[in-house]
Image (tube, rainbow, N blue to C red):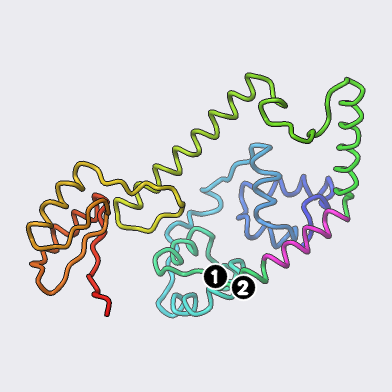
Amino acid sequence: MRNWRELSEDEIIKLKQLYPTTTNRELSKMFDISVDAIQDRFAYPNGWKKDNYKIGNRKGVSLDEKAIKWIIKHFKHIPNYEIMDKFNIGESTLHRVAKKYGLKKSKQYLRKSCQSNSKRAMEICRQYNIYEKNAEFSRQRWEQWKAEGREVGFKKGESNRDRLSPSKYKKLLEKVSATRREIIRKDKIRINWGLPQKTKLKLTSPGKKAIQYRYLLKRLNYIVVRGDIRVFYDEHTNRNLTTERRAIINGLKIEQYEQSN
């Protein structure tokens, strides 16, 4: 498959003429470039639109049981474009089937695909001298900063507060604080739903509702440990699953008591 930069002016003009009345999958075959390149490099920047009446509405495409069984069996290790070509369907139809049946690519396929894409990206960068252009741009910017008398790079022992202006340092602190608040908010939600934390922050302090459920569980002969969010039960406990579920939602953990020998 070619890179989109390799298209000549005549090919781009022809692509523009065919785009409104031809599907992206067919254009990809005709010009030997990817669908993403057609959309992201040509259609979106230039405002090209599809004529759905001439192309035909494909939203009603349906697959028979045999085709769906084949997709379920081979989806994990076959590229999407091969499946779409085999059954003459679009991306939305394939994505709908994959979502309905919970289909995912295998780890081996993703690893192989990632290696192939990385190799192809490296070849393209070398072909178009991307590395040299970036190095030249960085060198010119460095020389420009030095000519303007600006300090380039970091100094040993220099903090962000010393390096940045007051306004930029204030924005940095606001961004860091917002990120931390979002992390804490998500971890509290995980605790409330009885899921494991993804951070090591101490967010397990029981709230008012949790204290109330600790008292209710204690009355049902649960083993309530002082200063701990864990509540244990044994053979003498009169278990109430509804109360347990609500206690877990409010931050408590219900565990079976195992007496050590």
Quarter of the rendering occupied by the N terminus: bottom right
Q: Amino acid at mark 1?
A: Lys
Q: Which residue is mark 2?
A: 109
Which residue occupies 50% across, 64% down?
Answer: 94
Tell me where residue 261 appears, x and y as whole percent. 27, 80
Q: Distance from label 1 to label 2 (Cα)? A: 6 Å
Which residue occupies 88% across, 32% down?
Answer: 142
Residue most extreme to the front: 261
Q: Is residue 18 above or below residue 117?
A: above
Q: At numbered mark 2, what does the secondary structure look like: helix, strand or loop?
A: helix
Q: Which residue is mark 1?
A: 105
Tell me where residue 28 appears, x and y as whole percent. 69, 59
Tell me where residue 72 appears, x and y as whole percent. 46, 76
Which residue occupies 60% across, 29% down?
Answer: 172
* Most frequent secondary structure within the magenta stretch: helix
What is the span of residues highlighted in magenta in the rendered image? 114-126
Q: At numbered mark 1, what does the secondary structure look like: helix, strand or loop?
A: loop
Between 5 and 114, the one lying in front of the other is 114
Between 151 and 62, the one lying in front of the other is 151
The reply to whether discs 1 and 2 touch (Cβ–Cβ < 8 Å) is yes
Q: Is residue 208 above or below residue 216?
A: above
Q: Is residue 243 above or below residue 184?
A: below
